[in-house]
Amino acid sequence: MLRALCALSLVAALAACAPAEAPAEPSAAAPTTTPPPPDPAGIAANELGFVPVLMYHQITAYPAGEYDQTPAEFRDELERLYREGYRPVTAAQYIAGELDLPAGTHPVVLTFDDSTGSQLAFTGTGAVAPDSAAGILAEFAARYPDFGPVATFYVNNEPFGDDPRALPWLTAHGHEIGAHTADHANLSSLDADNVQRQLVQNVRAVTATGATVRTMALPLGIYPRDHALATTGSWDGTSYAFGAVMLVGSNPAPAPYGAIDPGGVPRIRSGRGTVPFDSAYWLDWLAEHPEQRYTADGDPTRISFPRALTAELGARWADRANPY
Ligand SMILES: [Zn+2]
């Protein structure tokens, strides 16, 4: 039990473990490696559980619609996520199964669509605007260093007011930049050539800043008539192949090691009960059904889950399976 507690929290480990027992001999110095992760059964680890992928639009003092939130509402949601043990990962990390989280915590993917100045802007001195989404995340991380404030920003061309500082700043701070088409196109209204043009021109604009585009979000949640073009295509000699296509609405996403369809990852609209099946609804649901939620085992090399769920594990992950 003591080992489990120590592994759960570095703070707890330092407070509870370090000074209590002096080594019997001077040579038996404290190990420099981190303690082994706890017994997965003891913490009800379930790395085949659901992951909330939250979708945000404008963070503004003057919300114009049900997609917008105030800075206070966004701060409140971050507080709730932190308090309930969620830790952010990017969409690219999620879809690749690169979820290196402390034992007992739960992944959450924070996504921002449309690259508005409410998400990232700079003050006159060049600092990030404190009430922008990026500014709020940075402030939150300063208070809770174990939160790891990474998000995925789905951008159009000329993002964030066409400020040349914006995309390099996001990359430098560990955020992911994803595709959202050049012009926020309704892809169902375009022919195949123009669908691919919208995505290639968007990918080119992002990669020109040094970033790599790994995932995309469908504008308006609408597929092109040929759904496959949302994932792969080419135009004018440039091709694209996204690891995930993000939808709009309306339920938690499957674990990356389970029954996930990378061609259509569901996202949950952030909200405080203001729209049906929003984040308030689903965070309540996941809190009431903890056995359905992704809970990390603390060891990124193995995938732990109750043995009864074995059939849900994707075949390509079998060599990392750790059923209990
Ligand atoms: Zn959009």
Image (cartoon, helix red, strand yellow):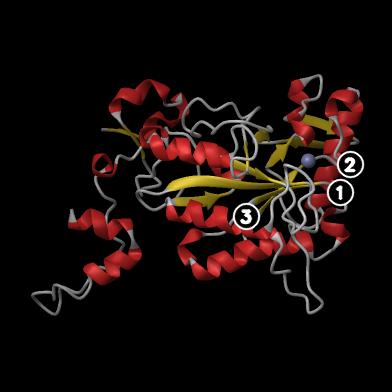
Q: Position of residue 185 (x, y in %)?
A: 87, 35
**Image: 222 above or below 145:** above
Residue beneath label 1, please? Answer: 157
Mark number, residue 183: 2
Element class at badge 3: helix
The residue closer to the viewer here, 89 or 142, is 142
What amino acid is at disc 2?
Asp
Could you tell me if the residues under marks 1 and 3 are in contact, i.e. CB atoms within 8 Å?
A: no
Left/right of residue 263 with respect to residue 193 in the rendered view: left
Element class at badge 1: loop
**Image: 210 above or below 275:** below
Q: Position of residue 210 (x, y in %)?
A: 75, 57
- Whichever of labels 2 and 1 marks the residue nearer the N terminus, that label is 1
What amino acid is at disc 3?
Glu
Element class at badge 2: loop
In this view of the protein, can residue 96 be seen by the observer? no
Q: Position of residue 200 (x, y in %)?
A: 84, 39
